[in-house]
Image (spheres, helix red, strand yellow):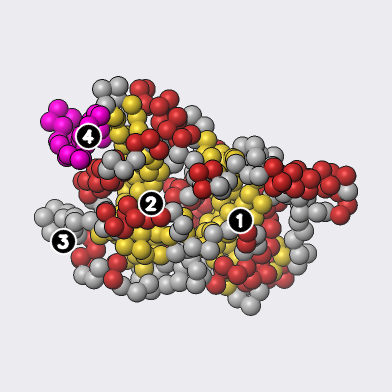
Amino acid sequence: MVLVKIAAAEQSPRVADQQGVVVIREYDEGRDKVAVEELERRCEVGGSRRGRPSLVTDLMGDPICRVRHFPSHIMLVAEYGEEKDIVGAVRGCVKNATRGSSLYAKLAYVLGLRVSPTHRRLGIGTKLVKRLEEWCKENGAEYAYMATDCTNEPSINLFTKICDYTKFRTPTMLVQPVHAHSKSIPSGVAIIQLPPELAESIYRQIFANSEFFPKDIDAILASNLNLGTFMAVPKKSLPKWDPRETFLPPSFAILSVWNTKEVFKLQVKGVSALTYACCVGSRVLDAWMPWLRLPSFPDVFRQFGVYFMYGLHMEGKQGVRLMRSLCTFAYNMARDDGGCGAVVAEVGQRDPVREAIPHWRKFSLAEDLWCIKKLADVKQGGGESETERHEPSNWLNSRSSSPVIFVDPRDF
């Protein structure tokens, strides 16, 4: 039987069973770093238990790296028993983002939930999420959301059946492996790198009615992890367009590139000997006959980094062609970076830009499930919450005002 207690000294939830007590507290880098890194290694994505390859994440000595770039963030850990072993962890952050129709809400993002395989089914994951939600409400969050693989039933059940989250959006994750060869961009297309101030202005204009567009987009574009914002336009339209003006070209595409390889690295483990041999063979064949320009499979069995494309948008008759050119440009950037194994984008399923993004279907995810929960209404100065002042309806029950979901690169 599992009993729930409150730790008076630390004001943290405790869960007691026959073997010990679990205490939920804030992460302390000095005392918890090594233990959390070991926990991450034990919690591989996928896993040989189901006969599937696993995707291992190396946080490169910084367990809090995935939320560090948010101005308001926290990491909680779960301590177990008299030995105070770290058996669970969760990260979270609070930010302002659009909920559609140019309305902003204060959102909490729950990510990186881990519970040691040897300590599951003790309610530890639930306690981590509940304590994190308390922190989010204390910091003004009106909604909390999380993202998971649509096949991750334990995670989905925890959030939807126990923590009262609702299945909300299902964006598509598109993955393009990086090969040994660069790709050509059509001669009639010009690629322009935009200064952060101009990129911010354009993004605030074109994503005003989207969902999850972050209010602090200026901080994202100014980050050292942002490799730049790029616009593709037909070369013949260049003389007619002045970037200093407020209007945009009739046909254009735009995206930004985020360097996740400076935050974490990935590695695939647990593939069959035949699969491994085929992947290695493709690279050997490509090295012998490079003139064939074969799409050899990158070496994902060693640690590799990922470039994440975000803020993807296209307009005009040549929009699709221009977006494909931009994705090719980002691919070539990754190819020139020796440690990059894939280029990834995530967009809404109904977003028109989806069809223009090159990807391999076998390695992409048709549905990346996002779940959301309305937290208790947050009062500001004794008055109404920000959402209530503008629109009384619950975001969970309202239809999306736009097919566009802006995926914050810090969330990836």
**Disc number for residue 363:** 1
Marks 1/4 in contact by CB < 8 Å: the verdict is no
Q: Of tags 4 and 3, which is closer to the observer?
A: 4
Closer to the chain start, of discs 4 and 3, is: 4
> Gap between marks 1 and 4, in whole Å?
41 Å
Q: Of tags 2 and 3, which is closer to the observer?
A: 2
> Percent from the top left, x then y, of residue 118?
38, 35
Q: How many marks?
A: 4
> Gap between marks 2 and 4, in whole Å?
21 Å
> Percent from the top left, x then y, of residue 229?
57, 54
> Gap between marks 4 and 3, in whole Å?
42 Å
Mark 2 surroundings within 10 Å by alpha-carbon count, few (fewer than 14), some (14 through 19), many (20 or more) = few
**Disc number for residue 384:** 3
Closer to the chain start, of discs 1 and 4, is: 4
Q: Of tags 2 and 1, which is closer to the observer?
A: 2
- Left/right of residue 254 with respect to residue 82 in the rendered view: right
Q: Amino acid at mark 1?
A: Phe
**Residue at the image position 49 percent from the left and 72 percent from the top:** 350
Closer to the chain start, of discs 2 and 1, is: 2
Residue of label 4: 17
**Residue at the image position 41 percent from the left and 65 percent from the top:** 169
What residue occupies the far bottom of the structure in this picture?
A: 317
Q: Of tags 1 and 4, which is closer to the observer?
A: 4
Closer to the chain start, of discs 3 and 1, is: 1
- Left/right of residue 370 with respect to residue 387 in the rendered view: right
Residue placed most toward the observer, 79 or 146: 79
Secondary element type, mark 4: loop
Tell me the magenta residue range: 1-24
